[in-house]
Amino acid sequence: LSGNTLSLSNDATSVDLGKYLDNTDSQELDFSSNELSISGSSKTVDLSGYLDNTDAQILTISGNNLSIANGNSVDLSVFENSDSQDLASATLSGTVLTVAIENGRSVDVDLAPILSVQQTQINDLLSRVEQIEKCACSGTLSTGEVFSKNKQPILYQNIPNPFNNTTSIKYFVPQHNDKAAIVFSNTSGQVIDTVFLQEKGEQEIFFNSSSLPSGVYYYTLYVDSHKIDTKKMIIE
């Protein structure tokens, strides 16, 4: 091939390819408005039938039917009232409550924290009832110094417990005792505070936890250098 002429060796005959070499492969596409055209041709393609803004369709819901503009609809009735499920079962194993819902999965709820608080309150009530029974005389309670006939020091459980900020601690120290104190400590046995009890008889003090982190603490009643009782308190 030389220029536009194709020839064969040892043959004087040649073929002029000029009319075929019109660079048709270098044509360019052009898009103007809705018309698609190609260079070197007067023909165009009208694309307006495809440019109908189908992405601007609107979703609507009527009753249980979800539909799209100029399109299909979906019946949602099979999904309605899903919130009206009933509890299928509830079983308690130890402190774990297992609850199952209709057509759904089961969930385990650990009741240990709630039961722990309730048990503390029950123990406190039992302790109070026991002390009341000890000081009861012929079916009635004495007035004035409630524990005058018992003559034994007593330390009550703090209320509330667990607590945050302030809790009340009641105690009883007989009048004949000389010295009494309530010592507060942490779980490591470190003393964090000591309150010397100036008032005898049935009294009450208030303990403030604002300077302490959350956790378990203990308080002990000492009377005339003798350990009387220790209670546990929980700061939230």
Image (cartoon, rainbow, N blue to C red):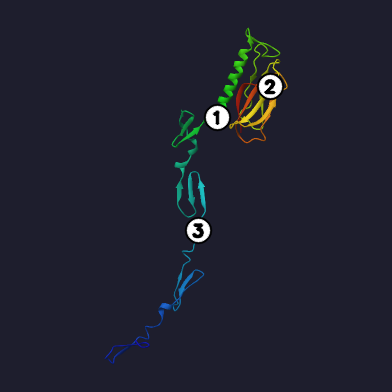
Residue projecting furthest to the front = 225
Query: Which one is in front, 100 or 178?
Result: 178
Q: Which residue is mark 2?
A: 180
Q: Position of residue 158 (x, y in %)?
A: 63, 25
Q: Which residue is mark 3?
A: 55
Query: Which one is in front, 25 or 169?
Result: 169
Query: Which is closer to the viewer, label 2 or label 1?
Result: 2
Left or right: 165 with respect to 92? right
Q: Position of residue 230 (x, y in %)?
A: 60, 24
**Looking at the picture, which amino acid does disc 2 mark?**
Ala
Q: Quadrant of residue 127?
A: top right
**Looking at the picture, which amino acid does disc 3 mark?**
Asp
Q: Is residue 24 visible?
A: yes
Label 2 to label 3: alpha-carbon separation: 85 Å
Left or right: 166 with respect to 188? right
**Marks 2,3: beta carbons within 8 A:** no
**Looking at the picture, which amino acid does disc 1 mark?**
Ile
Q: Secondary structure at mark 2?
A: strand
Query: Which one is in front, 36 or 226?
Result: 226
